[in-house]
Image: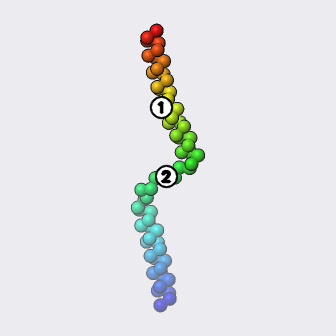
Amino acid sequence: MNRKKKINQTLKQKAKKANAKLHSSNKPKYVSKAERAAQAIAAETEMTQPIEQSAELVANENA
């Protein structure tokens, strides 16, 4: 009985691992706190630069 149980247990484990490989997770990749802060700063600078450039263009056109 013990041998049959052990064989079934290993077969179930292999089947479970194979099934897990087929179904990938929908969970997004982990991004560290430092990386999130760096991305926020980069996004903020991208937002402010076009505004400053357009303000300079408007000032040059009016002059």
Tell me which corner region of the image, top left, top right, bottom left or bottom right, holds residue 15. bottom left
Seen in the picture, residue 12 relative to 40 is either above or below; the reply is below
* Element at label 2: loop
Q: Which of the pair 12/53 is nearer the observer?
A: 53
Query: Is 57 placed left or right of 38 in the picture?
Result: left
Residue for badge 2: 29
> For mark 1, what is the residue?
47
Q: How is the image coloured?
A: rainbow
Name, please, the residue furthest toward the right.
Answer: 34
Q: Is there CB contact under 8 Å for labels 1 and 2?
A: no
Q: Amino acid at mark 2?
A: Lys
For image coordinates 43% across by 12% down, the residue present is 61
Residue found at x 43% / y 11% = 62
Q: Nearer the viewer, residue 17 or 63?
A: 63
Q: Nearer the viewer, residue 13 or 35?
A: 35
Q: How many marks?
A: 2
Picture layout, residue 13 above or below residue 58: below
What secondary structure is marked by label 1?
helix
- Seen from the viewer's position, the closer of residues 16 and 38 is 38
**Kind of residue at badge 1:** Met
Q: Residue 36 location in percent, x, y? A: 54, 45
